[in-house]
Amino acid sequence: MRGEQDYWKANLKLVAKLLTIWFIVSFGFGIILVDQLNQIPFFGFKLGFWWAQQGSIYVFIGLIFYYVRKMKQIDRAFDVSDDEDE
């Protein structure tokens, strides 16, 4: 079994990556780049508006599923999985 510090380092590295993506998607696309994105039509809406209202939510849901999958891999790699079927 690898050290507890390595486990938390892997965990925090994953969380930092996902929070960076979350920040870029919400603040970057939803606020900073909204004027540039609004120049692009998307299903009858301005892309910046659509992204701030709908698109970012899809990314956030995807991040949740990705986090769960990656944490299961990390847990297994460090032998700390709490799955009953294993």
Image (tube, helix red, strand yellow):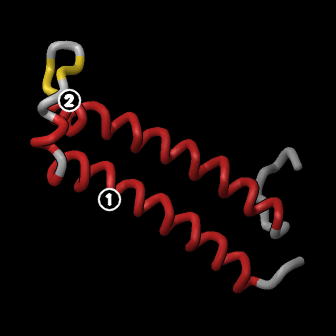
Q: In the figure, is residue 23 to the left or right of 47? A: right
Pick the residue in front: 32 or 55: 32
Pick the residue in front: 38 or 82: 38
* Mark seen at residue 47: 2
**Image coordinates for residue 76, horizontal then vertical, percent:** 81, 59
**Residue at point 16%, 54% (across, down):** 32
Which class describes the residues within 10 Å of circle 2: few (<14), some (14-19), or many (20+)? many
Indicate which disc, 2 or 1, sits on the residue closer to the N terminus.
1
Q: Reply above or below: 18 against 63.
A: below
**Residue at point 41%, 62% (across, down):** 20
Residue that carries the numbered disc 1 in the rendered image? 23
**Image coordinates for residue 61, horizontal then vertical, percent:** 44, 39
Which class describes the residues within 10 Å of circle 1: few (<14), some (14-19), or many (20+)? few
**Residue at point 65%, 78% (across, down):** 8
Pick the residue in front: 71 or 43: 43
**Image coordinates for residue 15, horizontal then vertical, percent:** 51, 65
